[in-house]
């Protein structure tokens, strides 16, 4: 995902890699905290990958950060309502 995010933003150096990876990990933690299946977050499909990229762009793309933050919020809400993405706890 790091390379995809850098490509989207036109970043062609490694100066921000550590920060971008931190945001990627933060997005994963955030998704897990709302009950998204850990294995799906760690090996993301296109829906989860898009959400993670959107989360990161909300920090990198300052002029459009509000738009990306709102988009990420909507994507999280969609994921939260898809039963195949929700972690089952004690058979519930």
Image (spheres, rainbow, N blue to C red):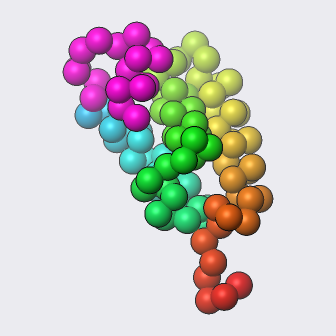
Relative height, residue 24 to residue 35 (above, below): above
Relative height, residue 72 to residue 16 (above, below): below
Q: Quadrant of the N terminus?
A: top left
**Whole-percent x, y for residue 74 in the image:** 73, 41
What residue is drawn where x is 59% and y is 62%? 36
- Numbered disc total: 0
What residue is drawn where x is 51% and y is 58%? 40
Is residue 4 inside the magenta stretch? Answer: yes
Apparent side of residue 73 relative to residue 10 in the rendered image (left or right) = right
Apparent side of residue 39 relative to residue 72 in the rendered image (left or right) = left
Instruction: Return the residue found at the far bottom.
Output: 90
Question: Which residue is nearer to you in this view: 2 or 84?
Answer: 84
Q: Quadrant of the C terminus?
A: bottom right
Q: Is residue 33 visible?
A: no
What residue is drawn where x is 63% and y is 78%? 88
Instruction: Return the residue found at the far left.
Output: 14
**Whole-percent x, y for residue 30 in the image:** 53, 53
Res 83 quadrant in image? bottom right
Res 13 quadrant in image? top left
Is residue 53 inside the magenta stretch? Answer: no
Q: Which residues, given as a range, are shown in magenta?
A: 1-17
Q: Is residue 14 visible?
A: yes
Question: Which residue is nearer to you in this view: 64 or 39?
Answer: 39
**Whole-percent x, y for residue 68 in the image:** 63, 28
Apparent side of residue 6 relative to residue 35 in the rendered image (left or right) = left
Instruction: Return the residue found at the far front.
Output: 45
**Whole-percent x, y for residue 17 in the image:** 27, 29
What residue is drawn where x is 57% and y is 36%? 50
């Amino acid at each position: 995902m790091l390379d995809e995010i850098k490509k989207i933003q036109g970043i062609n150096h490694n100066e921000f890699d550590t920060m971008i990876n931190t945001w990627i990990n933060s997005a994963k933690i955030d998704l897990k905290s709302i009950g998204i299946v850990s294995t799906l977050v760690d090996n993301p499909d296109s829906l989860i990958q898009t959400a993670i990229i959107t989360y990161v762009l909300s920090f990198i793309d300052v002029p459009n950060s509000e738009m990306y933050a709102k988009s990420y919020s909507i994507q999280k809400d969609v994921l939260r309502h898809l039963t195949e993405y929700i972690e089952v706890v004690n058979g519930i």
